[in-house]
Amino acid sequence: MKNMEVIKKLVGDSITESNLKNVDCYAFRNFALFIQSMGFCEFAVKEQHVHPSYMIIIEFGTDDFLIPPRIELKKNYYLASIVSPNIPHEDKAVEFPNYYTIMIDKEYFESQFLLYQNEIPRYAGQRTIYYGHGKHTENKI
């Protein structure tokens, strides 16, 4: 698989090409986009796994969310969650997941974040719901 070295840097050294057989991957330097186009990612469903990078999950409006929303989602809304490095988590093994995952290198993310803020927050699954031109942020999960 192309860019497997970048993928391992972002996801973790134990990921294999076989884990990604159902996933379209677009990786370059400090970023990777994962689209589970043919089914679930075998690495993502491992119990309490962690990543060395920041993970942003964008879930599309379905009834099969990774974590059910605590508010009512209107038509054309979607959820975005961010998880800091080394936060244990696991995904559900659904046949056709309806989310994209963006992984961002820890050092790169933090260097850019510190251009705007004085300290790095710890994200443990805080969600932001984006719609049209507005957004709503929920408390941490």
Image (cartoon, rainbow, N blue to C red):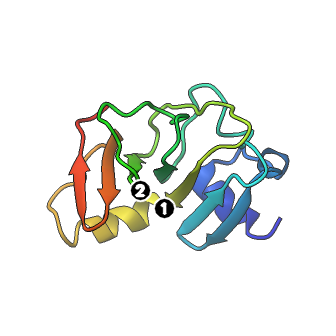
The image shows residue 68 at horizontal and vertical percentages of 43, 30
**Residue beneath the point at 31% across and 30% down:** 70
Q: Quadrant of residue 138?
A: top left
Task: Sort mark 1 into few (<14), some (14-19) or many (20+) by Cα contacts within 10 Å.
Answer: many
Report the Cα–Cα distance between label 1 and label 2: 26 Å
Type of amino acid under label 2: Asn
Type of amino acid under label 1: Ile
Q: Which residue position holds label 1?
A: 104
Pick out the residue farthest to the front. Answer: 75
Which mark, residue 119? none
Q: Which of 94 and 6 is in front in this view?
A: 94
Task: Sort mark 2 into few (<14), some (14-19) or many (20+) by Cα contacts within 10 Å.
Answer: few
Pick out the residue farthest to the left. Answer: 118
Q: Which residue position holds label 2?
A: 76
Q: Quadrant of residue 111?
A: bottom left
Q: In which quarter of the image is the N terminus?
A: bottom right
- Callout 2: SS: loop
Q: In the rendered view, does 13 fall on the left or right side of 124?
A: right
- Callout 1: SS: strand
Mark closer to the chain start, 1 or 2? 2
The image shows residue 33 at horizontal and vertical percentages of 59, 63
The image shows residue 116 at horizontal and vertical percentages of 18, 69
Q: In this view, does 118 lie above or below 73?
A: below
Pick out the residue farthest to the top. Answer: 47
Q: In the rendered view, does 118 fall on the left or right side of 54?
A: left
Q: Quadrant of the C terminus?
A: top left
